[in-house]
Image: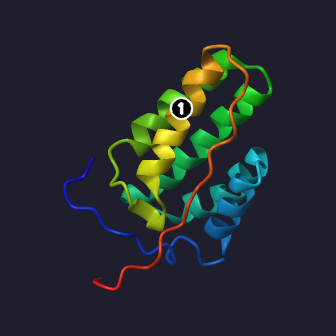
Amino acid sequence: MALCSFAMDTRGMDSGGDFARGLELFNGGQFFACHEVWEASWKRSDGLDRQFVQGLIQAAAAILHVERGNLNGAASTWRKACARLDPLADDYGAIALGDLRAALARFFAIALGGGVLPPRPQIRRLAPRSDL
């Protein structure tokens, strides 16, 4: 986790509203659709923003694998998502990334352990910071 956390301005990678639309789709359980929408944001981004969006895409894909019964694919894709999201600040991308990581970890611990699928994780947006 980064020592200095900040809220990224997502406008640069969200010029067409793709990032925000992807959040809505993710929270609505439309994981394939959010992956497709976020891909446009991912292609426009670079550096940590690119890593961030790719991690979200992989998290969505991993949930989709679970829902389709592909637990091996889910575990593999989940590990890739963790590698991209874990180094980022808890409030990266103007979302509650720390909360999302915790919710995803709970979800995958149960789902990959063969339990009844828990509620799908949700992404909470953060209010813009006034000290930027």
Which of 99/34 is in front?
99
Which residue lies at the image location 74% right of the left edge and 57% below the top edge? 25
Placement of 77 over or under 123, stated as above or below: above
Q: Residue at x 46, y 68 (%)?
A: 94
Q: Secondary structure at mark 1?
A: helix
Question: Along the horizontal axis of the image, is 49 left or right of 73?
Answer: left
Q: Nearer the viewer, residue 44 or 59?
A: 59
Q: Quadrant of the C terminus?
A: bottom left
Place of residue 2 in the rendered image (x, y in percent of width and height, measured from the top left): 24, 52
The extreme bottom residue here reads 130
The answer to whether 5 appears left or right of 17 in the picture is left
The spot of residue 62 in percent (x, y) is 64, 33
The residue lying at 40 percent from left, 60 percent from top is: 92
Residue 17 appears at what percent x and percent y?
66, 75
* 88 w.r.t. 129: above or below: above
Front in this rendered view, residue 41 or 70: 70
Amino acid at dot 1: Arg
Q: Which residue is mark 1?
A: 106
Residue located at (71% from left, 62% from top): 24
Local packing at callout 1 (Cα closer than 10 Å; few below 14, some 14-19, many 20+) is some
What residue occupies the far left of the structure in this picture?
3
Q: Is residue 51 visible?
A: no
Total tally of numbered discs in the picture: 1
